[in-house]
Image (cartoon, rainbow, N blue to C red):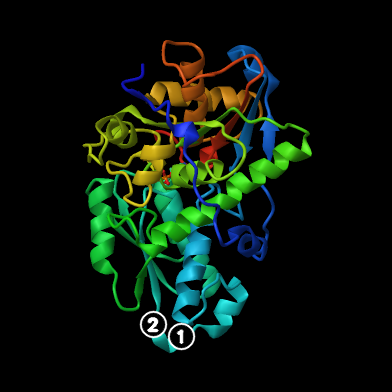
């Protein structure tokens, strides 16, 4: 059962300026970079009565089981490059050679799993320490994965928003905060993280073109603080394509849907969900104006809906954790109910892309 839905018929007419920088060039310099698959699933297209459903499969991205390293790697490079007086993202091997160990740099982040692991991973590649703050409720596997990257882990029996505040207090001086959310709408680091995510949508465009698919009607985006959604909305409002963009979040953490309906950021009290990466109570201030103006619709789904989608995608050969599979859950609600997208809505010709942002291993449901 869904608990909330929001729709903005004016969103598709919004236009944004294309990014000036090209994070994809930086990502291509990372060891092991390759575009993640865009997999067409005709069974789902038949079920939902649309032209095609394609899944952007982020289950293996640069050696990690989620998309988040795209943002973390780019923001870390921009942060360290800026300290060296450079206004671009230097490749990691160049940075490694220019970091002075005597400076005592440390990377700091708060996370509900994937972002912190990505920050810890890049810190390890750079040979600098990291301190990652987590809510105690995230899975034991997620904590172990962060520790395995060599990071110090600080567990806090607090909701995610308060964990973010604690990480902010821990940072300063040579403790560099690499956070994917912000209360400050013009903070550079969260914006660099968002810019880093643009590589994912740029790959989708290239992959659709390579398949000869020249239309894109709907992109479904799993949403926590809204930074990934910000990247997707920004991208598609700055190109000729004008797909509808549907955001999906857990019913127990419907902060984006609530904010969009209220017309302002409204912190919500969150509960427990298997969609750990989406369990956020406050929309990022960096993302807010972009989502307010350019997101077509937002919907909340239950754990049961997300877990059914995890199982169905697994049957179709796609390894998708609950956050990623929430996109299929949302599409099913939209395609089969009174919740409508703005005109022209979904048709038998529609091309739909689901952003499956993690593998099952990244977020083992129910494992604490
Ligand atoms: C797997 C996964 N998908 C989606 C998201 C949502 O990203 P954002 O918090 O930028 O909205 C997250 C965030 O942690 C995540 O881990």
Few, some or many residues within 10 Å of mark 1 (<14, 14–19, 20+) = few
Q: Position of residue 253 (x, y in %)?
A: 30, 34
The residue depicted at 27 percent of the width and 63 percent of the height is 168
Residue holding disc 1: 101
Q: Position of residue 146 (x, y in %)?
A: 44, 57
Residue 231, above or below 96: above
Kindly check if marks 2 and 1 are in contact, taking CB atoms under 8 A apart as contact.
Answer: yes
Assign ligand 1 to one image quadrant.
Answer: top left
Q: Position of residue 226 (x, y in %)?
A: 39, 43
The residue depicted at 52 percent of the width and 62 percent of the height is 73
Residue 84, above or below 258: below
Whether residue 123 is visible here, answered yes or no, is no
Whether residue 110 is visible here, answered yes or no, is yes
Question: Mark 2: which secondary structure?
Answer: loop
Q: Position of residue 63 (x, y in %)?
A: 61, 55
Residue 298, above or below 43: below
Residue 249, above or below 36: above
Question: Residue 317 is drawn in which quadrant?
Answer: top right
Mark 2 → mark 1, Cα distance in angstroms: 6 Å
Q: Check residue 104 in the rendering and tell me which mark sits there, or answer none.
A: 2
């Amino acid at each position: 059962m869904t608990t909330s839905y929001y729709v903005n018929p004016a969103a598709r007419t919004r236009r944004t300026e294309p990014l000036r920088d090209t994070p994809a060039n930086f990502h291509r310099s990372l060891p092991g970079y390759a575009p993640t698959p865009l997999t067409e699933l005709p069974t789902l297209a038949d079920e939902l009565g649309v032209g095609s459903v394609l899944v952007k499969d982020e289950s293996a991205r640069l050696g990690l089981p989620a998309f988040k390293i795209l943002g973390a790697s780019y923001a870390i490079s921009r942060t360290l490059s800026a300290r060296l007086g450079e206004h671009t993202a230097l490749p990691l091997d160049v940075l490694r050679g220019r970091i002075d160990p005597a400076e005592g740099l440390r990377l700091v982040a708060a996370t509900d799993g994937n972002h912190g692991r990505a920050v810890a991973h890049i810190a390890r590649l750079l040979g600098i320490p990291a301190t990652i703050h987590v809510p105690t409720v995230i899975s034991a596997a997620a904590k172990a994965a962060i520790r395995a990257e060599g990071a110090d882990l600080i567990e806090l029996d607090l909701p995610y928003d308060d964990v973010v505040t604690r990480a902010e207090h821990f940072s300063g001086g040579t403790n560099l905060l690499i956070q994917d959310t912000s209360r400050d709408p013009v903070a550079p680091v969260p914006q660099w993280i968002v810019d880093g995510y643009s590589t994912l949508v740029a790959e989708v465009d290239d992959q659709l073109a390579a398949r000869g698919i020249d239309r894109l009607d709907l992109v479904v985006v799993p949403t926590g603080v809204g930074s990934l959604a910000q990247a997707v909305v920004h991208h598609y409002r700055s190109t000729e394509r004008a797909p509808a963009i549907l955001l999906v979040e857990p019913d127990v953490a419907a902060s984006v849907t609530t904010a969009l309906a209220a017309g302002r950021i409204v912190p919500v009290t969150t509960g427990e969900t298997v969609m750990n990466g989406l369990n956020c109570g406050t929309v990022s201030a960096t993302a807010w104006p972009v989502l307010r103006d350019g997101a077509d619709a937002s919907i909340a789904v239950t754990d049961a809906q997300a877990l059914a989608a995890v199982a169905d995608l697994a049957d179709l050969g796609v390894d998708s954790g609950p956050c990623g599979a929430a996109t299929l859950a949302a599409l099913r609600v939209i395609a089969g109910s009174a919740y409508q997208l703005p005109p022209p809505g979904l048709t038998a010709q529609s091309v739909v892309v689901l952003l499956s942002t993690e593998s099952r291993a990244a977020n083992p449901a129910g494992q604490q």
